[in-house]
Image: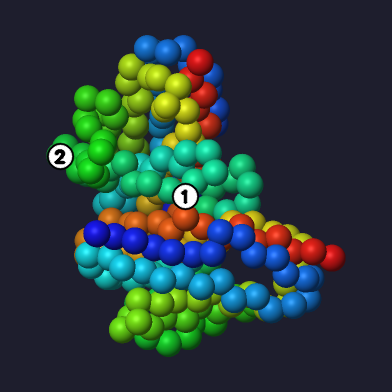
Amino acid sequence: GQNIDQPTEMTATEGAIVQINCTYQTSGFNGLFWYQQHAGEAPTFLSYNVLDGLEEKGRFSSFLSRSKGYSYLLLKELQMKDSASYLCAVRNYGQNFVFGPGTRLSVLP
Amino acid sequence: SAVISQKPSRDICQRGTSLTIQCQVDSQVTMMFWYRQQPGQSLTLIATANQGSEATYESGFVIDKFPISRPNLTFSTLTVSNMSPEDSSIYLCSVPLGGTGGLGGGYTFGSGTRLTVV
């Protein structure tokens, strides 16, 4: 079977750091993706990991451990505009994606 | 990176009718994907639209209900047929950011079609 788990909701304070975890069990693995989705909008690509380790892109970093079936998205210097849902998605072999349920992040002043 | 124009952005339809959603990409892409996002939920892949051949459907989705066309490398349509209130959802198309369908990089989404069936 295929299963991706993420926390349903998280709350953090403006300026802080937050880590959103994702664990997965899928029939194949060809990359893990993180997307940001604001309410009423389409998802926007944030990051992509295919090898173990940390990928950094400005205020956003994503980590992957394939042996543990684990990833996290790290958001630094949180801003109010970061309030959104964050979706973890695993690409199986080929181009099929399995999306996690998403984590709704609320950034408070 | 590839840019997608998706329409309509929203529609309210009567039960039993059909709606066709269009996605136009500004560059040639080998693969296009159609997703459904039900209220408050994450994305579920409906099918992969292949140019020159039939679409590949995921478990739980069938061609009779969701026929797909892919006449060329920049355009695809998804039809939601014989609609019922359970089909009320957001439908999105997606293509590789780089447009080539390679294994690297992220994917971009159309702006979505919010469908309400009454």
**Depth check, front residue: A35 or B94:** A35
Residue at image mark 1: B42
Q: Is residue B69 left or right of residue A45?
A: left
- Helix, strand or loop at disc 1? loop
Q: Is residue A10 left or right of residue B88?
A: right
For the N terminus of chain A, which image quadrant? Answer: bottom left
Amino acid at the residue labelled 2: Ser
For the C terminus of chain A, which image quadrant? Answer: bottom right
Q: Is residue A58 above or below residue B21?
A: below
Chain bearing mark 1? B
- Helix, strand or loop at disc 2? loop
Dot 1, how many residues are within 10 Å of its Cα: few (below 14), some (14-19), or many (20+)?
Answer: many
Chain bearing mark 2? B
Residue at image mark 2: B53
Residue reaching furthest to the right: A109
Viewer-nearest of labels 1 and 2?
A: 1
**Depth check, front residue: A70 or B55:** A70
Dot 2, how many residues are within 10 Å of its Cα: few (below 14), some (14-19), or many (20+)?
Answer: few
* Residue B36 quadrant: top left
Q: CA distance from mark 1 to mark 2?
A: 28 Å
The reply to whether residue B5 is in sight is no
